[in-house]
Amino acid sequence: MQYILKTITRQTAKPIEIIDITDEVSEAVTSSALDAGQVTVISQHTTAFVNINEKEERLIEDMETFLKRFAPKDGNYQHNLNPIDGRHNAHSHLLGLLMNSSETIPFAKGKLMLGQWQSLFFVELDGPRQERNILLQISGI
């Protein structure tokens, strides 16, 4: 069994942004030269997450709207009274309760085994940010 670590670094532009990273993860798996195994994709942040869902423009807009409504940025949150880094981002942490920090996807013959409508997304909840890191651990034979 071999293990390969790679990092995807992204800049985000919006307060809530859903970014398709399927092609980048797929390319990392292909370039690993491993035939079969799994890739674990993990956000290294507490206000940005990884999610598998359908890639459809209007659905992505619906998801962003849903997140904004579910935990509004201007809510009365205790965390915002004395934030560690000066960011009033309690809403981002609360939304994270509903999301995964990581996803593990099997691959075979160098290809991700996602379903027909599945894509892999990086979900920014506290943007814009200059640098966000997504760690990939690719393991296989």
Image (cartoon, grey):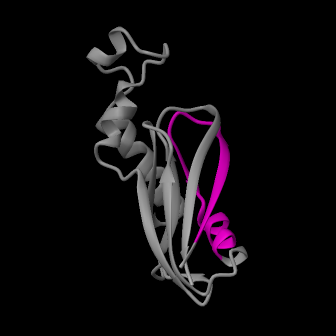
Residue found at x 46% / y 54%: 50
Query: Is residue 13 part of the magenta span, yes or no?
Result: yes
Residue found at x 42% / y 56%: 102
> At which x and y percent is residue 127?
55, 32
Would residue 55 appear left or right of 100 to someone viewing this image? Answer: right
Query: Is residue 108 part of the magenta span, yes or no?
Result: no
Would residue 101 appear left or right of 124 to someone viewing this image? Answer: left
Toward the viewer: 79 or 35? 35
| Residue sitting at the far top | 82
Toward the viewer: 4 or 18? 4
> At which x and y percent is residue 70?
29, 38
| Residue sitting at the far right | 31
Would residue 132 appear left or right of 120 to someone viewing this image? Answer: right
Toward the viewer: 39 or 129? 39
> At which x and y percent is residue 136?
57, 60
How many numbered dots are placed on residues in this image? Answer: 0
Residue found at x 36% / y 53%: 100
Residue found at x 32% / y 18%: 79
Q: Quadrant of the C terminus?
A: bottom right
Q: Is residue 51 above or below residue 91?
A: below
> At which x and y percent is residue 86?
49, 13
Q: Is residue 118 above or below residue 133?
A: below
| Residue sitting at the far bottom | 109
| Magenta extent | 3-29
| Residue sitting at the far front | 1
**Quarter of the figure with residue 5:** bottom right
**Quarter of the figure with residue 89:** top left
